[in-house]
Image (spheres, rainbow, N blue to C red):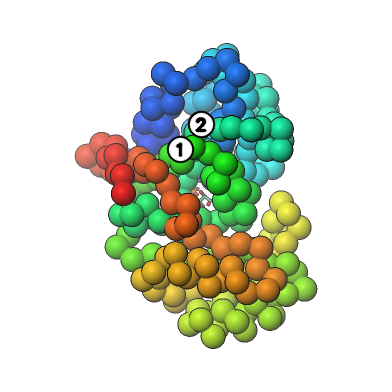
Amino acid sequence: MTQDELKQATARAAIELIKPHLEDDMILGIGTGSTANFFIDMLAELKDDFDGAVASSEASAERLKSHGIPVYDLNSVSNMRFYVDGADESNDQLHLIKGGGAALTREKIVAAVAEEFICIADESKLVGVLGKFPLPVEVIPMARSHVGREIVKLGGDPAYREGVVTDNGNIILDVWNMEIIDPKATEAAINQITGVVTNGLFAARPADVLFLGTKDGVKTIKP
Ligand code: 5RP
């Protein structure tokens, strides 16, 4: 199976999980990236069975709208049963690295609101220790150099993601060469740096379930 087929299989597993729970007034949280895109395309089949979605990026919002799925502002939504999104890395505790698509801040906000965070990813994303994938950090533009120096003090090698402006108007530093032994502590430490909007570690609010697309089928992993 190709990596895309594994991503499609995991998106299908998420569809099957949420399908029996859909209600006319339900709003779903939807993530960003190629795996989330497969999920959005499959969700179109069910668009008459729920009200609409909150998207974690402008790109996902556009894709949802192209299927005729209404997109809501998160501020108009008081509860959200499910958030479905991909990841760049996950450990077996479902602590994640996210933000490869630069949408980490909105992803983290929508995940914070959701009752259940369903992560969908192909098997290449499951790792023993997080950090081989460079950790994305969203930074206020004028703080770029300061944040970079502070990250070096924490043991990382920050690299400016050239040409990328987030949906929030900020920049991304990708932090290389960090072996993230304690994801919660690292998440908190980086978020403490003045000028950081947020970082792509999802450890304080991990996923609740991971559907992992493997060549032997989709595995369900819970912490
Ligand atoms: C975007 C993300 C994505 O979930 C992550 O990059 C995974 O993407 P893909 O499904 O394309 O592998 O965090 O900011």
Horizontal and vertical percent position of residue 61: 67, 36
| In-front residue for pair 66/51 | 51
Q: In the image, is residue 3 above or below residue 67?
A: below
Whole-percent x, y for residue 151 in the image:
56, 79
Quadrant housing residue 99: bottom right
* Residue on which disc 2 sits: 81
Which quarter of the picture shows residue 194? Answer: bottom right
In the rendered view of the protein, which quadrant contains the N terminus? top left
Real-space Cα distance between discs 2 and 1?
A: 6 Å
Q: Which kind of residue does numbered mark 2 sit on? A: Arg
**Residue at left offset 69%, top offset 56%:** 166
- The part of the image, by quadrant, that contains residue 197 is bottom right
Identify the mark at residue 116; answer none if there is no mark.
1
Q: Is residue 2 visible?
A: no
Count every numbered label the image shows and give the total: 2
Q: Residue at x 53, y 72 (%)?
A: 189
Q: Is residue 22 above or below residue 82?
A: above
Whichever of labels 2 and 1 marks the residue nearer the N terminus, that label is 2
Secondary structure beneath label 1: strand
Q: Amino acid at mark 1?
A: Glu
C-beta proximity under 8 Å, tags 2 and 1: yes
Q: Nearer the viewer, residue 41 or 103?
A: 103
Mark 2 neighbour density, 10 Å: few (under 14) some (14–19) many (20 or more): some
Q: Position of residue 12 (x, y in %)?
A: 40, 29
In depth, the one of 182 and 171 nearer the eye is 182
Q: Residue at point 30% right, 54% down?
A: 92
Residue at the farthest left position: 216
Viewed as shown, does residue 129 lie left or right of 74?
Answer: left
**Residue 17 image point, x, y percent:** 39, 27
Residue 219 visible to the viewer: yes
Q: Secondary structure at mark 2?
A: strand
Could you classify mark 1 by the number of other residues whose Cα lies within 10 Å: few (under 14), some (14-19), or many (20 or more)?
some
